[in-house]
Amino acid sequence: MKTVKNLIVATALLISAIGMANTATADFGKKVVKRYEVEKNLVKVNLDPVFIKKGQKVMMNLLNISQGKVLLKVYDSKNRLVFDEAIDGKVVVEKAFNFEQAFEGEYTIVVVDKFGTYKETMEVR
């Protein structure tokens, strides 16, 4: 009796496997492509740095997926370099710029990575 039950279960599994194997491959491929496109859109990440100003301070955060070299520079209103740093091999680059003791004027923070150059200005009064 157990042998008959096992044979019926095995037959049912074999029939369902054959049925799944005989489905149209074009339909199956479309489902996979659609699912992949949705997942691709969900994983899309903005790689531009984020600048947050609080009073006379600017916090910068950059997701550096390539882990390549990131250049941080600060220029004053007369285009003179007042800060320069190169960071290499870090996935997350964070830096706080404190302008509380800086002379009055406009300062430009420049971030350069593999994907582009980004600027943020800070007015000190």
Image: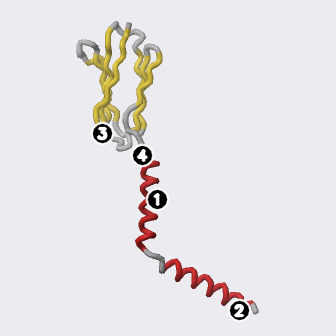
In the image shown, does 86 or 66 lie closer to the viewer? 66
Q: What's under tag 3, amino acid-wise? A: Phe
Viewer-side label of 4, 1: 1
CB under 8 Å between discs 4 and 1: no
Instruction: Calculate the distance from the C-alpha at mark 2 to the C-alpha at mark 4.
Output: 53 Å
Bin the neighbour count of mark 3 within 10 Å (Cα to Cα): few under 14, some 14-19, many 20 and up. Answer: few
Distance CA(mark 1)–CA(mark 3)? 28 Å
Q: Which residue is mark 4?
A: 44
Q: Which residue is mark 1?
A: 35
For the residue pair 10 and 70, the one nearer the viewer reads as 10
Q: Amino acid at mark 1?
A: Arg
- Specify which label sits upstream in the sequence, 2 or 4: 2
Q: Nearer the viewer, residue 67 or 108?
A: 108
- In this rendering, the label closer to the viewer, 1 or 3: 1
Q: Is residue 26 above or below residue 84?
A: below
Q: Secondary structure at mark 4?
A: loop
What is the x, y in percent for residue 80?
Answer: 24, 15
- Residue at image mark 3: 115
Query: In which quarter of the view is residue 63 placed?
Result: top left
Among numbered discs 3 and 4, the one appearing first in the sequence = 4
* Residue that mark 2 sits on: 4
